[in-house]
Image (cartoon, rainbow, N blue to C red):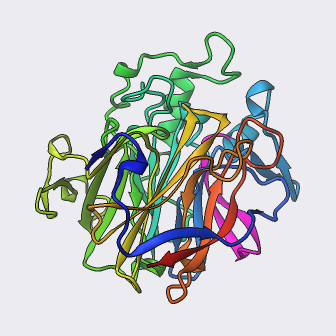
Amino acid sequence: MRYKHPTEIPRSEKIRSLEWTGDRIPCATANVRGDTHPMAWAADGELYIGTGDPNWMIRDGVVYASIDWTNKQISDEEYKSMCGLCVEKITGNPIEFELSRVNDMPGYIGGGGYGPKPSGMISVDGVLYYAVQNLLGWKPPRFRKNSQHGSDATILRSDDYGKTWTPDLDPVLLEMEKEQYVRGNRKVTGFGWQTPPEARAEYKGWKPMFPGNLFGGPSFIQFGQDNREAVDDYVYAVSGDHWDNGSEMRLGRVSKDKILDRDAWEFAIPKADGGVEWVKELDVSEPVLTIEGHLSLPEMVYIPSIKKYLLVTWALHTDFDAKDGSELTLLEADNPWGPFKLVYYEWMWYKEEASPYCPRIPLKWFDNTNLIGWMLHSGNWQTQIPYYLPQVRPFKLIMK
């Protein structure tokens, strides 16, 4: 399934379109910032999310925000709280939801694609799993030199709803960052990684689960609360090859009790008859979907009432630049490997100045009977208008 543009994809025969039923609603917690936001509807009923470059922290009981942290001197504590990634919890309902910090993840630091960023999260049998990319620092993107790469991913496990994670990579990542990375303004000469990308294939014997960019940003397919709507005993994940404006999406799966076992993972090769072959070797696998330059960090959820997988992806109109707006693509399929059909395409998603990105569909807030829900995403990181934060917008699926 190779396409040059989303509108080339055949239309869905079952779902006519997506209809927005209201305006966006930003997070009600003052000064909260961040993006990417993979999420898990956990066994305890809560929504946990991963946040990239959160740009906010709690200091002396006050929520403190700093959008311009790259342009000034900040303390080590602030840097570790606001830069890289963290784990948070959503409370309330979509009309007025709030965020609280669960774990600063102090070792996972580095701005933008210069350091680790979240890509996926899922809850399975009471355990949270968190997929994190860019663990070996900035690497060249696969296809488009100005896009943001998505590389070198690993999956973490938490048995206490995000308070602690296994493996504990904080010491390894902090040591590597201290040794090889210079903090500061990205526009200042000398800022960033002091070792070439090819020299960072490992660090003192540690390697990510999925080196490189073929499976550099795993996003777990969501099957309801704590994975209870799963169709079999596997956990599935899709991954693009860039953070933004990539081209290829691969599919992997693993037995639900072996998620951290890299050798237990297998990857799809789609077949001409609509089936799929599973192989152990990632570099032998093939994309289940290609949309050249229009496939960014993906999200896939399963809707049991209509027995459909929904795939939502996006692209920026200018590679890794939020000033010119973004596009939104919604596809459906009978299986995680496709074939995919087009449900909805919006060339100027919401507003140019908003430039939404990284759409997610919180299944906790989705009505399987009436097919209404909320799409959560972030937005423009280049404006002082409050778009760079978690926000939701209500929608309805229109059936044929």
Residue range of the region highlighted in magenta in the rendering:
83-105
Where is residue 355? Give x, y as percent. Answer: 67, 44
Q: Is residue 390 left or right of residue 276?
A: right
Query: 87 or 177, which lies in front?
Result: 87
Hey, which quadrant is residue 30 in on the image? bottom right
Disc tally is: 0
Q: Residue at x 56, y 39 (%)?
A: 316
Please say whether residue 208 is one of the residues in the magenta stretch: no
Q: Residue at x 27, y 69 (%)?
A: 335
- In the figure, 334 relative to 370: above or below? above
Q: Residue furthest top?
A: 189
Where is residue 193? Give x, y as percent. Answer: 52, 20
Q: Residue at x 49, y 30 (%)?
A: 147
- In the figure, 318 relative to 198: above or below? below
Hey, which quadrant is residue 144 in on the image? top left
Q: Residue furthest bottom?
A: 369
Where is residue 14? Give x, y as percent. Answer: 38, 76
Q: Is residue 139 left or right of residue 237?
A: right
Q: Residue at x 50, y 85 (%)?
A: 368
Quadrant, the C terminus: bottom left
Question: What secondary structure is the stretch in magenta mostly built from?
Answer: strand
- In the figure, 393 relative to 35: above or below? below
Residue 241 at least partly seen: no
Please say whether residue 101 is one of the residues in the magenta stretch: yes
Where is residue 254? Give x, y as percent. Answer: 25, 64
Query: 180 or 120, which lies in front?
Result: 120
Query: 6 or 27, which lies in front?
Result: 6
Query: 347 or 357, which lies in front?
Result: 347
